[in-house]
Image: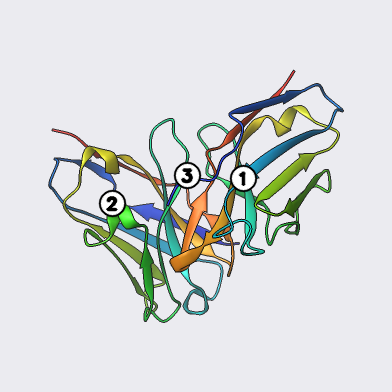
Amino acid sequence: QSALTQPASVSGSPGQSITISCTGTSSDVGGYNSVSWYQQHPGKAPRLMIYDVNIRPSGVSNHFSASKSGNTASLTISGLQAEDEADYYCCSYSASSAYLFGTGTKVTVL
Amino acid sequence: EVQLVESGGGLVQPGGSLRLSCAASGFTFRSFWMSWVRQAPGKGLEWVAKIKNDGSDKYYVDSVKGRFTISRDNAENSVYLQMNSLTAEDTAIYYCVKYGGTYFDYWGQGALVTVSS
């Protein structure tokens, strides 16, 4: 049960768009439409941002969007804002009723 | 408003045991699976365990199987994590999380567990 692979860091200027990738295998990301994304500010609990690949929960800004192709899922933040600076984690259902989180990506707003 | 409040964290020696509790409110607790997710200091998130709404099914990450036990009391709106044979690798913040079916929709603030001599 290895963690899903994410880039360690991604940065962008305010107003720009950035994309975070999340790579797994056919036994997790590629095998199920159960990918979710979480935002975590320092010292805080994670917050659900996207579930079931591309669905935003109520209260999440529409400048967050997501998709999946094969074994790779992606989170896009459009119109980057200062408050988007945080750590982001993907998560996927996996075989044996387990869940795998990604390695995490630190987003920096320049 | 959904609230999840963990308790029971602390310092424990290697090989020791600890029981975490999570008090839930703001939703129909008996209708939902619950889970525990942990985060080692400065590290990423790791799913630990989940339990069915009626307590009849339980699943664990391989690294805690045989050592950790998740349980719940629907009358008390609480979920628990009994942790035995603790090692330094179990040092982490443990989050109580409401399971939304395929995702984790509400998180507690976490309980810090430190395993050290």
In terms of secondary structure, where does tag 2 sit? loop
Name the residue tied to disc 2: B8
Classify the position of the N terminus of chain B by image quarter: bottom right
**The disc numbered 3 marks a residue on which chain?**
B
Name the residue at 60% across, 37% down. Answer: A6
Please tell me which residue lies in front, A81 or B24: A81
Mark 1 and mark 2: Cα distance apart in space:
35 Å
Which amino acid does the dot numbered 1 rest on? Thr
Q: Which residue does the image show at 68% across and 40% down from the upper left? A: A21
Judged by depth in the image, the label closer to the viewer, 1 or 2, is 1
Badge 1 crowding class, 10 Å Cα cut-off, few under 14, some 14 to 19, many 20 or more, is many
Q: Which class describes the residues within 10 Å of circle 2: few (<14), some (14-19), or many (20+)?
A: some
Give the label on residue B45, or none. Answer: 3
Mark 3–mark 1 distance (CA, rounded to whole Å):
16 Å
Q: Is residue B109 left or right of residue B90?
A: right
Q: Which residue is mark 1?
A: A23
> Disc 3 on helix, strand or loop?
strand
Q: Which amino acid type corresponds to the residue marked 2 in the rendered image?
A: Gly
Percent across and percent down for residue A27 are 54, 60
Rendering colour mode: rainbow
